[in-house]
Image: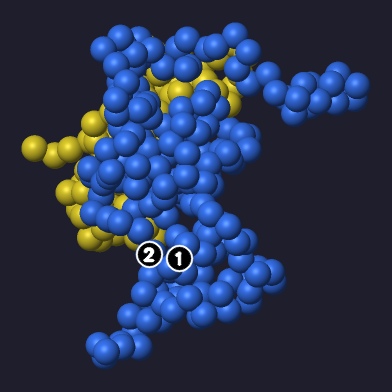
Amino acid sequence: MKANELTTEIKELNLTYLMLAQQMVAIDKDMAIFRLGISKDIADILEVLTPGQILKLANSNMMLCRIRFDDNLIFGMLANYTKDKAMAQSHAAILMAGQPAEEIS
Amino acid sequence: MRKKSVVSEAREIQTAIEMIHLGARLQLLENETNLSRERLIKLYKELKGVSPPKGMLPFSADWFLTWQPNIHSSVFADIYRYLIRHADCRGTAAIVKSYKLYLEHCKVTGMEPVLSLTRAWTLVRFFEARMLQTASCTQCGGQFVVHSNDLHARYVCGLCHVPSRAGKTNKARAAALAVAAA
């Protein structure tokens, strides 16, 4: 993949992510806070973003969403479970719910 | 008698309807809304087509500590804690929302929901009464539902250290046989 294509893909993903996140916040803010793993302050910002602002935000060569398993343990549970899939996923859900939310300082 | 607001009554009926759909028992509805018992029974019959079940609610705190229910209730408890800490919903709204997220988790992972809304509500009441609490597992660091009076210094959760016969129910065996036969 060329660098040019890569930035286009990143922009597109950023745009989709922001639009989906905004929609989730609009439908149910509390559940969106859980699903996205963000703090209330970020949810408040997402809620009031205008389409123009979303476009400007998305137009970047950096990804705006981040990987949530910054932990080898959770990664292992989600990716290489051996026997009981449901239990491994539940275990990962318990650990992920215990993680701190993404916050702005 | 205090003056009744029509708007707040409508809102309470809406909450009651949602909770009945999620499988709430009558005692829970009576506790969480200000509607009269007669109205709630009527509402229940209208939505479910049958009379609400009679008898006592499940009251055992030990149920939450057996292997499979413990995992299910820990998933619920962690979602609930997350919502209380980061979102601003409280009380019934927080319980209903976390229960919906729990049901979603079960659906995605293909598990049968073991925890009912009434049990989830009981769990929160047990937390508030300090009969149950969460302790972090020394191996994975996750928060799991435990008795308040147990020793948790070297607690290891049921998922890091799976008991040898855990999950091997008659139902699971029958399902495995059905898969093998097909």
Q: Position of residue A49 (x, y in %)?
A: 24, 57
The chain displayed yellow equals: A
Amino acid at the residue labelled 2 = Glu
Query: Looking at the image, which is closer to me, A41 or A92?
Result: A92
Subunit ID for the residue under disc 1: B
> Residue A41, can we see it?
yes
Q: Which tint was used for chain B?
A: blue
Circle 1 residue: B29
Q: Residue at x 60, y 17 (%)?
A: B166
Are the residues under badges 2 and 1 in a single subunit? yes
Q: Residue at x 59, y 22 (%)?
A: A85
Subunit ID for the residue under disc 2: B
For disc 2, the neighbor class at 10 Å (few under 14, some 14 to 19, many from 20) is some
> Residue A6, can we see it?
no
Mark linked to residue B32: 2
Q: Going by the image, does B18 lie left or right of A28? A: right
Disc 2 and disc 1 in contact, CB within 8 angstroms: yes
